[in-house]
Image (cartoon, helix red, strand yellow):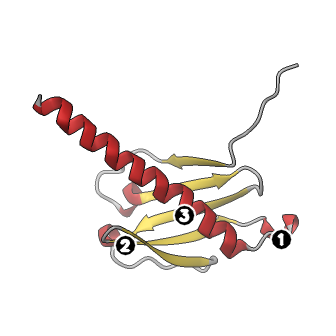
Amino acid sequence: MYDNKLPRFLISQIGVKKGTYQDYRKWVTCTLYSSVAEFICLDYVGAFSTTNINMTFYFKRETWIGSLTVNNCDIYEMDPLKLLEEAWDYYSNYLEWLDTQINSFDKTISN
């Protein structure tokens, strides 16, 4: 029997939209709680308004806003702010990893 396990979080984004704020929208889907967190770097888009549950986060010198665009936390009795923090931890770890890949790519080119 095949044991198919979904990861707890999945990252998604849409293709580049030629310099609109859409280019900076990133989503983290929580498969366990059927919810979606959206993250936008305010340093690139300026102000961003949402009526969803949201929090401000920081990555290096960038300011990000995170909001739950699909919130099913009540169904699973999960604290939505805790889920948003967990999704940010996952996404910020991905950004850290991405930085290491860019740095290693730069070293490869310079050699």
Image location of residue 67, percent across then percent down: 58, 71
In this picture, residue 78 sits left or right of residue 86: right
Q: Quadrant of residue 22?
A: bottom left
Image location of residue 93, percent across then percent down: 48, 54
Which residue: 49% across, 64% down? 39
Q: Nearer the viewer, mark 2 or mark 3?
A: 3
Where 51 falls versus 39 (above or below)? below
Mark 1 and mark 2: span between their CA atoms?
A: 28 Å
Instruction: Give the position of the C terminus as an image quadrant.
Output: top left
Q: Nearer the viewer, mark 1 or mark 3?
A: 3
In this picture, residue 76 sits left or right of residue 82: right
Mark 2 and mark 3: span between their CA atoms?
A: 15 Å
| Residue at which label 3 appears | 88
Which residue: 40% across, 53% down? 96
Q: Quadrant of residue 45?
A: bottom left
In this picture, residue 99 sits left or right of residue 109: right
Number of residues whose C-alpha sits closer than 10 Å to that of mark 2, classed few (under 14), some (14–19) or many (20 or more):
some
Amino acid type, residue under disc 2 in the picture: Leu
| Residue at which label 1 appears | 74
Q: Earlier in the sequence, mark 1 or mark 2?
A: 2
Amino acid type, residue under disc 1 in the picture: Asp
| Residue at which label 2 appears | 42
Mark 1 and mark 3: span between their CA atoms?
A: 19 Å
